[in-house]
Image (cartoon, helix red, strand yellow):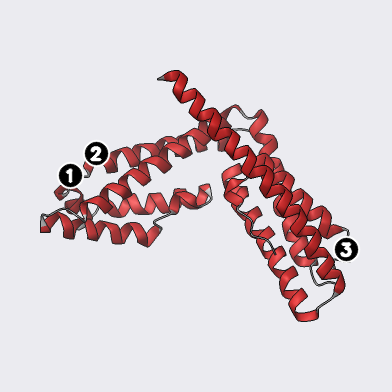
Amino acid sequence: MKKISYYLFSNNALFTFIKGIISIVGKTTVAELGLKVFQDLTIAKFADFDLALKRDHVDPLTQKLNQADQNRDHRFIGFKSYIAACQYRKDAAWHEEAKKIDRVIHRYGGDLYRMANAEESAALDNLIGDLKTEPYSTAITTIEATNWLAEMESAQQDYKALGQQRVEQTDTNTNTIGDTRKPLINANKSLLSMIELQNQATANPALKDLIEQINNHIAKSMASARLSNSLNEKEDLVEEAQND
């Protein structure tokens, strides 16, 4: 099956792409092909993502929350990058203390900013909590990373405060893009993987035809996504030039 670069899909493009996958698979004898569990899971995660998209268009807190999430992502990446750079300092003390901090960062996930929002919040809370205790607090002071840590903690608290405002709202739709996009992608990956495995195991002509249809859908969707990203990049360059 053709490769899918999910990161190229905007949220709306991902919605359209997976809606197409569900439609294509749904036209087959899903149960007979051994795909029902995986198709049902994808449909369920798609429904959650659909609600999250709808909420984004009507919830005034969404934009603020998304921006706050991006801010804490940037503060974490900045902190992690600074620690990585400190491992190359000539001073042996800086080198060793930076390595110590780097190990605890990776204990909770060097790419934790890619996690679903709730998982990221828990990981960041635990990481920050550890960094404020010994021996890490001394290490933070030694390599002059106090401000980096303070900025990361402040961004995390800002995000959590906005999250609490959302919890206090009466809206029963609690789905967010950050919490539903990754589970939807994972469900779709599982569905497509099962289709491939079933095809290898049974050599069923129906599965071969299904894969061909899905590959056509992937090819068209990826081409559209790449074009959209290319146009967005050009627009950004034009805007930057106008601002110079």
State whether residue 115 is above or below residue 156.
below
| Residue at 56%, 38% in the rendered image | 167
Residue 86 position within the rendered picture, expressed as x and y whole percent measured from the top left: 21, 51
Foreground: disc 3 or disc 2: 3
| Residue at 11%, 59% in the rendered image | 92
Could you say whether the residue bearing mark 1 is in a helix, strand or loop? loop
Residue bearing the label numbered 3: 28
Looking at the picture, which amino acid does disc 3 mark? Thr
Task: Report which quarter residue 94 is drawn in.
Answer: bottom left
Looking at the picture, which amino acid does disc 1 mark? Glu
On screen, residue 77 versus residue 203, left or right, reads: left
Quarter of the image with the N terminus in it: bottom right
Marks 1 and 3, how far apart at CA: 61 Å
Can I make out residue 144 in this image?
Answer: yes
Foreground: disc 1 or disc 3: 3
Q: Earlier in the sequence, mark 1 or mark 3?
A: 3
Residue 34 position within the rendered picture, expressed as x and y whole percent measured from the top left: 80, 72
Task: Report which quarter residue 211 is drawn in.
Answer: bottom right
| Residue at 22%, 45% in the rendered image | 145
Tell me the tag on residue 147.
2
Q: Earlier in the sequence, mark 3 or mark 2?
A: 3
